[in-house]
Image (spheres, rainbow, N blue to C red):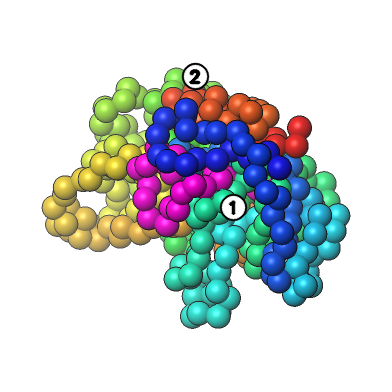
Amino acid sequence: MKAVVVHQPGSTEVLNLERVADPIAGPKDVIIKVDACGVCFHDVVTRNGTLKFGVQMPCILGHEISGTVVDVGRDVRAFQRGDRVATAQRYHICGACRYCRTARETMCPERKFTGDWGMVGGYAEYVAIEDDNVALVPEGVELQDAAIVACAIGTILNAIREIGQLQPGETALVTGAGGGLGMHAIQLARLAGAFVIAQTTSPEKADRIRALGAHAVIVHGRGEDFSNAVKRASGGLGVDVAIDNVGSQLFEPIRRSMGIGGRWIMIGQLTGEFVPFNPAQLFLKNVSMLSATSTTRKQLDDCLALVARGAIKPIISLALPLEQAAQAHKLVETGKSAGRIVLRPNG
């Protein structure tokens, strides 16, 4: 099969289109003919070497996968050939630890992240994913849309519903609002009944961000402190929940934007930069620093159901063939794409 393989960290030049062996189904494996695979900034930091934890090279990138089942292992019962499916971001969990048994499999000590750990990823014509990490795509949901549901929507659902417990009437700040996570965070925060403040450094995306439901859109230059604008938009109170899709580059303005008792949910970290701060700046306002990482199977099923009902719309700006993976990475790195870019390995 064709696949994009990374042998060592580097620029987009390390994205090599190669012929590799087709996956063979192990006992719990679902073999998927890949229809679409989203291009996430996680792929970029894996490729360029910023992310090191859990990465084993050579690897095939890509963890936002949808497609059609072409084979299953002997122990698989829930899926059969011809099923339309989407995956969570992992290809293996143990299924038996205290995290797996309490719907917290994103923290399984044995978890292997798809696209990081070796030659299992969505930048390929076929992929093998263990059945614990696969979900059926509802009728009426396009496979291209389903590809990005686990990461771009499910991770945000995890942050808003489970971690941040955003309540109707509260105020939410969404950073990186024009990106793949941000555009879906706006929709989910509105669905939760929050007043939504969106932050972006891309003036050309502002109208689309408003159209998705943001009550206030803050556009500013890179490196500028936008916290005063957040405070004005929130009536001087600051925000109850911050959905932080960017990380250390926005650390100080987000900290200044937090209200009393605020929950700061960290999702994205685009660089390897560290941030010094005084803990008193948080605990004097009783601000909680929390994090959300990937998506459980239940959250994936819930998000697919929301998409099927039309409550959430997956935002995909561009679909490219596998041969243009480097172009996709360049667009993601520059921040010019709105929403997600997907690769279509099988045309």
Residue at x 44%, y 62% (from the top left corner) = 163
Label 1 crowding class (10 Å Cα cut-off): few <14, some 14-19, many 20+? many
The magenta-colored residue range is: 45-67
Q: Is residue 53 magenta?
A: yes
Which labelled disc corresponds to residue 120? 1
Quarter in which the N terminus is drawn: top right
Whichever of labels 2 and 1 marks the residue nearer the N terminus, that label is 1
- Residue 252 drawn at (x, y percent): 23, 41
On screen, residue 203 versus residue 340, left or right, reads left
Quarter in which the C terminus is drawn: top right
Quadrant of res 11: top left
Residue at x 79%, y 50% (from the top left corner) = 68
**One can see residue 326 in this view:** yes
Residue at x 81%, y 54% (from the top left corner) = 70
Which amino acid type corresponds to the residue marked 1 in the rendered image? Val
- Residue 344 drawn at (x, y percent): 70, 35
Label 2 crowding class (10 Å Cα cut-off): few <14, some 14-19, many 20+? few
The residue lying toward the viewer, choosing from 147 and 312, is: 147
Which labelled disc corresponds to residue 204? 2
Residue at x 59%, y 49% (from the top left corner) = 121
Which labelled disc corresponds to residue 274? none
Q: Residue furthest right?
A: 82
- Residue 71 drawn at (x, y percent): 80, 59
Which amino acid type corresponds to the residue marked 2 in the rendered image? Glu
